[in-house]
């Protein structure tokens, strides 16, 4: 009995250290772990170590790429400019509508049967030439000789551009009188300043004032193309509206479309002749933040 007990104790004592070195397996399928000479901890084998300089080089390359990206000017849609263009147009049209509605009420209160044609001619002539006083944007007109706003570098113009003295003659002696006379004819027919045809002409003038800021003040040559499309389309709509009330007035007002066709061709050609100096390509049709222009209200 004693010999049997001693035998069992001897077997258990010799088996314990052997079991301690048997490989152990995890229930989730990890590989066996074995001790290493470099550490007292148990490590997973095989192991690989990436050279540290690889990470450093990669980080430096990424940093350099970010620096290059940051140094390149980012051109994004100038939402601020678009909002201000629309706001200026809304303000100007709101003022025109309010003023003409007030005129209609004053005429009704005073009991004037018919406002003299000459009085209306002067009123509408002033509107035709000085409509920009109701627009909050910077609306400096170009110089007659240089065709540029003061303190702005001269742009390259088409060789077939009319001489500078032609522009004031066209506006003062042709376009202005045509607008004034036809608008007076419309008032004589409708008896209202705030009627739809006259307000259509005021819309044309307001779009023209916004376009002047884009083309002559901010020098956004690409956006100027879209602006001149608005000017041309609104002019045709105004002439059509006048024709619906009084055909003769519509035909006379449509004569200015000849000059607007010439002016539109000038604008398109000027856009082609004056590319972006940074890219050598024509300016974007939509206003962007990388054009060096900032749209600002002059009133506030």
Image (cartoon, rainbow, N blue to C red):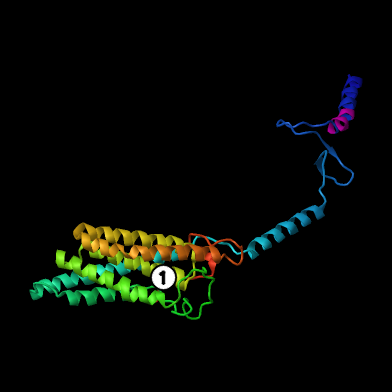
Is 41 or 251 nearer to us in this picture?
Answer: 251
Q: Residue at x 36, y 63 (%)?
A: 258
Is 62 or 241 nearer to us in this picture?
Answer: 241
Secondary structure at numbered mark 1 = helix
**Where residue 169 sits: x, y (%)?**
36, 76
Is 252 or 84 nearer to us in this picture?
Answer: 252
User: On screen, 21 above or below 272?
Assistant: above
In screen coordinates, is 137 left or right of 98?
right
Query: Where is residue 296, by image quadrant?
Result: bottom left
Is residue 67 visible in this depiction of the protein?
Answer: yes
Q: Residue at x 25, y 59 (%)?
A: 241
In screen coordinates, is 64 left or right of 81?
right
Q: Quadrant of the C terminus?
A: bottom left
User: Badge 1 is on which residue?
Assistant: 212
Q: So how many labels did they put on this image? A: 1
Q: Please state the extent of the stretch shown in magenta in the rendering.
A: 14-20
User: On screen, 144 above or below 36?
Assistant: below
């Amino acid at each position: 009995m004693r010999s049997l007990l001693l035998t069992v104790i001897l077997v258990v004592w010799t088996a314990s250290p052997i079991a301690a070195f048997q490989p152990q397996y995890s229930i989730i399928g990890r590989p066996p772990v074995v001790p290493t000479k470099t550490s007292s901890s148990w490590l997973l084998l095989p192991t690989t170590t990436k050279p540290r300089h690889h990470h450093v080089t990669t980080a430096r390359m990424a940093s350099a790429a970010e620096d290059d990206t940051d140094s390149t000017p980012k051109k994004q849609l100038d939402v601020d400019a678009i909002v201000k263009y629309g706001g200026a147009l809304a303000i100007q049209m709101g003022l025109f509508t309010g003023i003409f509605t007030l005129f209609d009420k004053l005429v009704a209160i005073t009991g004037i049967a018919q406002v003299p044609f000459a009085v209306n001619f002067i009123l509408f002539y002033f509107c035709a030439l000085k409509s920009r006083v109701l627009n909050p944007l910077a609306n400096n007109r170009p110089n007659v000789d240089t065709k540029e706003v003061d303190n702005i570098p001269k742009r390259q113009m088409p060789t077939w551009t009319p001489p500078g003295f032609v522009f004031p003659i066209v506006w003062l002696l042709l376009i202005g009188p045509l607008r004034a006379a036809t608008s007076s004819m419309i008032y004589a027919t409708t008896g209202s300043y705030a009627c739809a045809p006259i307000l259509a002409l005021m819309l044309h003038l307001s779009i023209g004032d916004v376009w002047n800021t884009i083309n002559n003040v901010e020098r956004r040559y690409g956006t100027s193309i879209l602006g001149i499309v608005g000017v041309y389309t609104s002019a045709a709509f105004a002439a059509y509206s006048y024709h619906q009330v009084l055909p003769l007035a519509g035909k006379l007002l449509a004569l200015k479309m000849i000059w607007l066709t010439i002016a539109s061709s000038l604008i398109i050609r000027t856009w082609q002749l004056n590319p972006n100096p940074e890219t050598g390509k024509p300016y974007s049709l939509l206003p962007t933040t990388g054009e060096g222009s900032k749209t600002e209200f002059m009133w506030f």
